[in-house]
Structure formats: C-alpha cells, structure tokens
Amino acid sequence: MTDLQIVPTDSKLPLDNSAALMRELVAHLRENRTGLREEWLRRIFETELLTAMTREEVFAEATSVYDSYVEALETRTLETLQAYAQNLSERIIPRGVETHEVVGIVLLLRDVLARSLFGKYHANFKVLNAILDAYEPAANSIAITVSVGFVQQRERIIREQQEAIRELSTPVLQVRERLLILPIIGVIDPQRARQLTEQLLRGIRATRAKVVVIDITGVAAMDASVANHLVQTVEAARLLGAMVIVTGLSPEIAQTLVNIGVDLGKMNTVGDLQGGIEEAERLLGYKVIPSEVANA
Amino acid sequence: MQVPILKQGAHLIATVQSALTDADLVQLRDAIVEQVGRTRARGVIIDVTALDVVDSFATATMRDIAQMIRLRGARTVIVGIQPEVAFAMVQMGLTLEGVTTTLDLEEALEHLGERTNGKVAR
C-alpha cells in the first residue's frame, strides 16, 4: 500500500506546516460537503458519465466516493479508499461502466474540489500555492488508486472468463467404458494446445481409458508447432497406455502434418468421428449390431 | 538403490521405488535379463509409477531391456508413466518406440495374459 506523498515543493514551508494545511483543507471540504457534492453531480450528469446507472444510484455512490475521498486526504492512507474502489468496481463492472467513466468522475471531483480551493484562497496567492502543494499530489494518488483499482478488477474478471472459456473449450468426454473422445473446435494456440494435452492425459488416468478419439473436424487449420504438439500428445497418451485415434483431419491439416514429416506409423487416423468411434469400439472388443439383426 | 524383482506366476515384476542413478539402471537391466532366463518368465513388468523424472539414459535402458528380453523369449510392459513425465519425455524426443506401455499393473497383467496364456494342445 502506498501512502500519500504530501511533500511541499516550496522548500520554505516546513513539513508539519503541510499537515496543518491538510487539516484546514479537510475541514473546508467537510463544511462544504453538500454544495461540492451537488456541483460534482451536476458536472457528472452534464458530461453524461455513468449513464448505465440511475440518478439515485449515482447520487448514493457519489456520496460514498466523496466521503472516502475526504477521508483519504485526512488519514493520508489509501487502504480504505482502495477497498472501496474495489468494491465499487465489482458492483459497477457488470453494469457496463467503462474505464473512461470511472477515471472521468474521479478527475471531475478533483477538479471541483480544486476550483473551490481557488475560490476560497484566491485573495492570498501564497496560501493558495501552499494548499495546492498539499492537495495536488494527494489528489493525484487518489485518482491513480481508483483508476488502477478499477482496471485491475476488470482484468481479473477477464482472466476468470478466459479461464472458464478455455476449460469449456476442451471437454474430455467418456462415451464408453475406457473410451474417451476429445472434440476440438476452433483455433488452437500453443497455450490451448498445452492445456488440452494436460486435460487429456489427466482424463486418461482418471477414467483408465484405453482408447482416445481426438476429433479435429472443427479445426480449420493449425500451424507446424501446434501440429507437432498434437503428435506429441498422441505419443504421450501412448506412454500412459492409451491408444489415440485422430479423426476429421482437414486437407490443410493433412498437408501440414505431411510437411512437418510426421511418422504416420505412430498416428492412427480415421476419416470422421463416426469411423473413429467404430474403430475404437473394434479395438475395445465391442460389436454394435442393430437389434432386429440381433433378435433374428 | 536396488530395485526388487518379484516373481508372480509366469511374470516378473520390478517396481522402481525412487529415482535411479545410471549405475542402478544398468544393475536393474542385468538383473532382469538374467532372471528372465533363470525363472523362465514369459513376461516382465517394470513399474515406474514412483518416478517423476525419466531422462534419456533411463529411456534408452528401458528400451534396451525390452529388446534384450524379447531376445530371451519374453515380453516387457512399462507401467505407470505419469502424465507430466509422459509429456516431458515426448518433448525431449524420448518415445520408447516398440515398447508396450500400460496405465497400471492390472492392465499390464491382462495384456501379458492375452499374449502368453497360449495353451499347447494336441
């Protein structure tokens, strides 16, 4: 956690003087709380920020932000504000509030408060300078803290969603005792390829699979490194004691595999998923017959 | 670290319990190949479930063992390669070509049973 940096740039001012100034500043902001908050809200609505929220919500949040803001100036620590910013981000991100809106409202508040300071001290230029020396760095750190908190929260949500999508994108399914299928759809990047391998190998262990059908009908093309990875996955599965059948290779992928010089003796490939499952059943000793034939 | 080699029916089972040095591997190879003849075993199972690293020398030795045992008239099955180990081996190009691998001991015994339970009939 970073503490507020409140060091006067004017070296003639002693440090404890800045603390006194800050107290005066905080007192001023407390006194004029209602007026400044109204002014801030007016500016928010005027610039059409936070349109995803109702006026009442904006009012409630603005009040809390204002109080946390003044509190951060008073205590010179950002912890409370940081926690509040995180909490606020969690609530408003799902509502579709954008980064520029959050940064915008914090900068607006900063501006509103600075203007009121100008208004109060404009007669005494020296004091105004000293006050701004104390106020500006603190206000900057607050603005940075809130914006960074919002962006971090957003990134965390994006990461979680990516993780979820990735896991959903590579299901390892058991279709029969000791037979797994792994349908792959979409683009495979190296990271997804690695995750896919991990899930497959773990799946083989967990279900004691003997045959695995990897269906890549839904993959239009893959580059040489991913193709190599696929071949390695097949080999690794074999080391665990499972046989792999790859089905649905597109002409482009077949081309890639031939170009990288895959040993076809190691790769068991069948045209489509149906054929792959039939082959797997044959390997496992299943025989599927239509019931009228079986009953006859 | 000596690897115990147990006889179970018509098969020998060697269970590796901890990481092996190159010398241990050579010693294991010699012991297995010698015992296959002495016990008239028809199958050899090497269980590597406990290994979390398998290097190139170990891979080469396992392949050698499989081939020597083949020449001595028996079959070899490597058992229990861990998923991470399998992938690391493949990435290093160590693929144990021509050697049968199975998930666990049960599988290996089943596999060897299919191959070696041939009866002599008149």
Image (cartoon, helix red, strand yellow):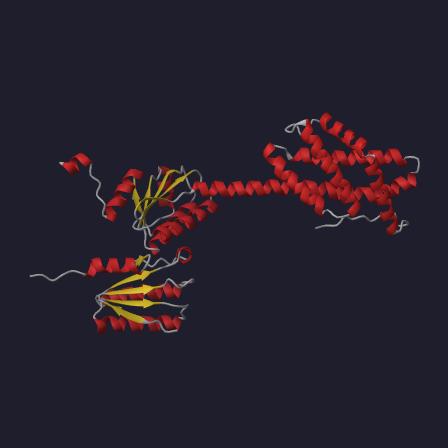
Residue A152 at what x, y percent from top left?
Answer: 63, 43
Looking at the image, how many numbered discs can be counted on the residues?
0
Residue A45, compared with residue A120, is above or below; it is above
Residue B114 at what x, y percent from top left?
Answer: 21, 57
Residue A183, compared with residue A15, is above or below; it is above
Residue A272 visible in the current orientation:
no
In the rendered view of the protein, which quadrant contains the C terminus of chain A? Answer: top left
Q: Residue B66 versus residue B103: which sits nearer the camera?
A: B103
Which residue in the rendered view is the most extreme toward the left? B122
Q: State which quadrant residue A144 falls in.
A: top right
Q: Residue at x 45, y 48 (%)?
A: A195
Q: Residue A270 versus residue B106: which sits nearer the camera?
A: B106
Q: Residue A218 versus residue A122: which sits nearer the camera?
A: A122
Residue B116 at what x, y percent from top left?
Answer: 20, 61
Q: Residue at x 69, y 34 (%)?
A: A61
Residue A294, compared with residue B89, is above or below; it is above
Q: Residue at x 37, y 59 (%)?
A: B81
